[in-house]
Amino acid sequence: MKKIMSMLLIVTLLLGLVSCGGGDSGSDPKLGKYLPHTAEMFGITMTAEELFGSPDSFTLELKSGGKMTLQADGEKGDGTYKIDGENITMTVKVDSDEMTMTGRLVDNMLYLENMLDAGINIAFYKEGTTPVEAAVTPTPEPVDETEEETDVPDDNQTDGTDEQGSSDQGVFGNYYGTAYHKNANENFFFGEELPIWAYLGQDSSGNVYFEIYAEEDHNSDSVLVSMWVMMFDNQMVPHIGEEDAWIYDMYLDIEDTSALTVNIENDTIVMDYMYREVDEGVEYFADVTFYLLKEGTPWKEPNF
């Protein structure tokens, strides 16, 4: 089982960050290799060692002439960057995909903000320097004195992991409902509606998972959807790794995270997915909506 915040590792690996060597920093102090220091998402912060094992396994290099190199776990991306004051914009090409990342370059620290529009912030420090122990994003929004007093931690405050284990447990349990399939082609393997059952909860290690079944007894042969998830104030965020999450036997990838993130309200889960797959030249597609009510909740017709 992967720990909650290893999602950050999966996202950054997708981006293909890191450099292949120290390079020549020349006379510009901003040039050189940057190593990851901390990463933050949904208020949970982890160190580079916790995420990557070693900062050297995930680095970023700014070169002269506005060029850069990023690489991770053998994946490499080359790109360009522009600096305007403390602001930095980087455009990286990995295979045929081009991605733009923005952040701030402050002294020896490089802060990448809201990566992949997923709320992920990563702080890097220049190799050979001491990282600044500060928030991942160095310029938080100002708050008034009342808010500051409210936000002061007390002895009863828990971190994000503990919150997942307590405040979100109210949504854990069995669900029942219907999978609706609209705009399906003739090859799609289910009819317009399919009775389904689901479970949201923790395994013996405390990791949270979500599964949907075609059979009420939840037998393993009837699994239709399976994924690890993270819970934040009743928001269910898929934790998608490599071939460990799927819908209808089709593996999901990290780009599906946003579309499959749902808020669980009034003991109801509504998850939408545009299913598109080509298998041996045959195309299957449908607009899928999983509509689920928590066990014990009277049936309510959906309003979509």
Image (spheres, rainbow, N blue to C red):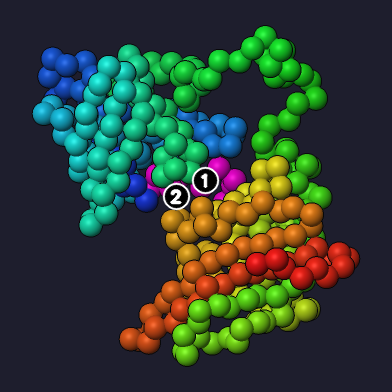
Q: Across the whole image, how many numbered discs are drawn on residues?
A: 2
User: What residue is at 41 percent from the left and 44 percent from the top?
Assistant: 116
- Quadrant in which the C terminus appears: bottom right
Q: Is residue 7 magenta?
A: yes
Q: Residue at label 2?
A: 10
Disc 1 is placed on an element classified as helix
Q: In the displayed structure, would residue 42 be above or below residue 3?
A: above
Q: Are marks 1 and 2 in contact (CB under 8 Å)?
A: yes
Mark 1 and mark 2: span between their CA atoms?
7 Å
| Prevailing secondary structure class for the magenta stretch in the rendered image | helix
Q: Residue at label 1?
A: 6
Q: Residue furthest bottom?
A: 186
- Nearest the camera: 282 or 178? 178
Amino acid residing under circle 1? Ser
Classify mark 1: residues with Cα within 10 Å, few (<14), some (14-19) or many (20+). Answer: some
Amino acid residing under circle 2? Ile
Please state the extent of the stretch shown in magenta in the rendering: 1-13
Residue 130 rendering spot, x and y as whole percentages: 38, 16
